[in-house]
Image (spheres, grey):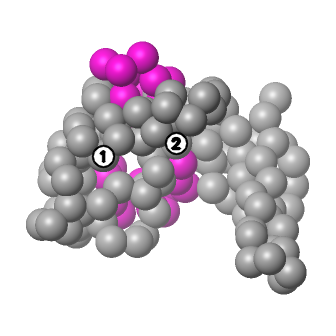
Amino acid sequence: MYPCFYNQCPPPETQISTIVDNIKNNNLTINTLWIVVDSSNWSYNTTINQKLINTLVLSAQSLGQNVGIFTNIYGWQRIAYFKIFIPLRWDELNGIQNYANFQEFGGWTKPSMHLYTFLIDRGCGTDIDISWSY
């Protein structure tokens, strides 16, 4: 999920409950709800970002939804810069299906998944992330 930060956006708890409700109401199953923490639209105030991330995580967990963070070392250090102990989907488009170049950050000693490349479908406009896990 890409969190919404603007004043007109619903509170983080509502953003999460809406997603989880839509998953259940449409009989979908997902293993993990990934919160995207990249350079898009985040505050430059890490304290505000930390509070938002914690609220999103706790809201998802309170609804029984597994939750993780989708980021890389650069995004995390600029946006949040704190230790969190939930799964990491590591965003490192290096074309390699392993964790060999991973540098510890944010409390993570290794990722749960690695986004290493993506396919661009020029036909219908759908991009597909290709991730690897071991």
What's the residue type where badge 2 is placed? Answer: Trp
Dot 2, crowdedness within 10 Å: few (<14), some or many (≥20)?
A: some
**Direction from residue 52 to residue 86 in the image, left or right:** right
- The residue to which callout 1 is attached is 15
What's the residue type where badge 1 is placed? Answer: Gln
For the point 74% across and 69% down, the residue is 127
Q: CA distance from mark 1 to mark 2?
A: 13 Å
**Direction from residue 43 to residue 127 in the image, left or right:** right
Q: What number is the disc on residue 45?
A: none
Q: Residue 110: horizontal and vertical position, in percent?
A: 64, 33
**Direction from residue 46 to residue 61 in the image, left or right:** right
Residues shaded magenta: 60-85
Q: Quadrant of the C terminus?
A: top right
For the point 84% across and 82% down, the residue is 122
Residue 83 belongs to magenta span? yes
State which quadrant residue 79 falls in: bottom left
- The residue to which callout 2 is attached is 34
Q: Residue 76: horizontal and vertical position, in percent?
A: 42, 54
Q: Secondary structure at mark 2?
A: strand
Q: Secondary structure at mark 1?
A: helix
- Can you say whether 112 is above or below 97 in the image? above
Dot 1, crowdedness within 10 Å: few (<14), some or many (≥20)?
A: some
For the point 35% across and 63% down, the residue is 78
Q: Residue 95: horizontal and vertical position, in percent?
A: 85, 62
- Can you say whether 17 is above or below 101 in the image? above
Q: Nearer the viewer, residue 61 or 123?
A: 123
Q: Does any portion of residue 26 appear in the rendered image?
A: yes
State which quadrant residue 117 falls in: bottom right
For the point 23% across and 38% down, the residue is 13
State which quadrant residue 41 falls in: bottom left
Q: Does any portion of residue 110 appear in the rendered image?
A: no
